[in-house]
Image (spheres, grey):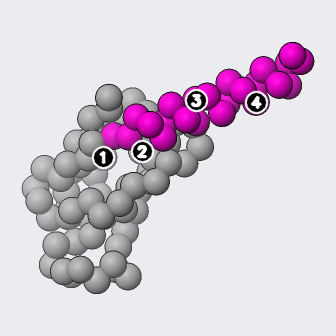
Amino acid sequence: MGILDWLIAAYLGKKTHNVVNRPTVSSLKGKFHVIGMEPVGASQWRIFILDRRHGDNTSLRESFHVRRGDTQHSQGGDTFTIFWP
């Protein structure tokens, strides 16, 4: 197994680990609610949020990125707490 094969296997293993271990995100003030998450690369997640005043209109959703190890994120006057497994 060459060095390139080893690097590819390591990256894919880390990316799989990221997909399996998704974060738990909660809004401290309750102004937004989380409507979805998707993994980005090997150690980041894109979090989709929606302002509660807009109801279920997902065309008005916003998003932000978090890296593994982040514990808080502020957006739109609200603070999100991030828990990692």
Tag 2–tag 1 contact (CB < 8 Å): yes
Is 77 displayed left or right of 44 in the figure?
Answer: left
> Hey, what amino acid is under mark 3?
Lys
Q: Secondary structure at mark 2?
A: strand
Q: Secondary structure at mark 1?
A: strand
Q: Secondary structure at mark 3?
A: helix
Q: Where is residue 19 shown, x and y percent of the image?
A: 48, 41
Residue positioned 50% across, 31% down in the render? 17
Mark 2 vs mark 3: in front: 3
Mark 1 vs mark 3: in front: 3
How far apart marks 2 and 3 lie (CA) works out to 16 Å
Q: Secondary structure at mark 4?
A: helix
Res. 73 mark: 1
Tag 2–tag 3 contact (CB < 8 Å): no
Query: Is residue 72 visible to the viewer in this orientation of the structure?
Result: no
Is residue 43 covered in magenta? no
> Hey, what amino acid is under mark 4?
Ile
Q: Where is residue 21 shown, x and y percent of the image?
A: 40, 34
Which residue in the protein does label 4 denote?
Answer: 8
Disc 1 or 3, which lies upstream in sequence?
3
How far apart marks 2 and 1 lie (CA) works out to 8 Å
Q: Which residues are magenta?
A: 1-23
> Hey, what amino acid is under mark 2?
Val
Disc 2 or 1, which lies upstream in sequence?
2
Which residue in the protein does label 2 denote?
Answer: 66
Residue positioned 30% across, 46% down in the render? 73
Graded by Cα atoms within 10 Å as few (under 14), some (14 to 19) or many (20 or more), the crowding at tag 1 reads: some
Which residue in the protein does label 3 denote?
Answer: 14
Is residue 3 covered in magenta? yes
| Magenta: main secondary structure | helix
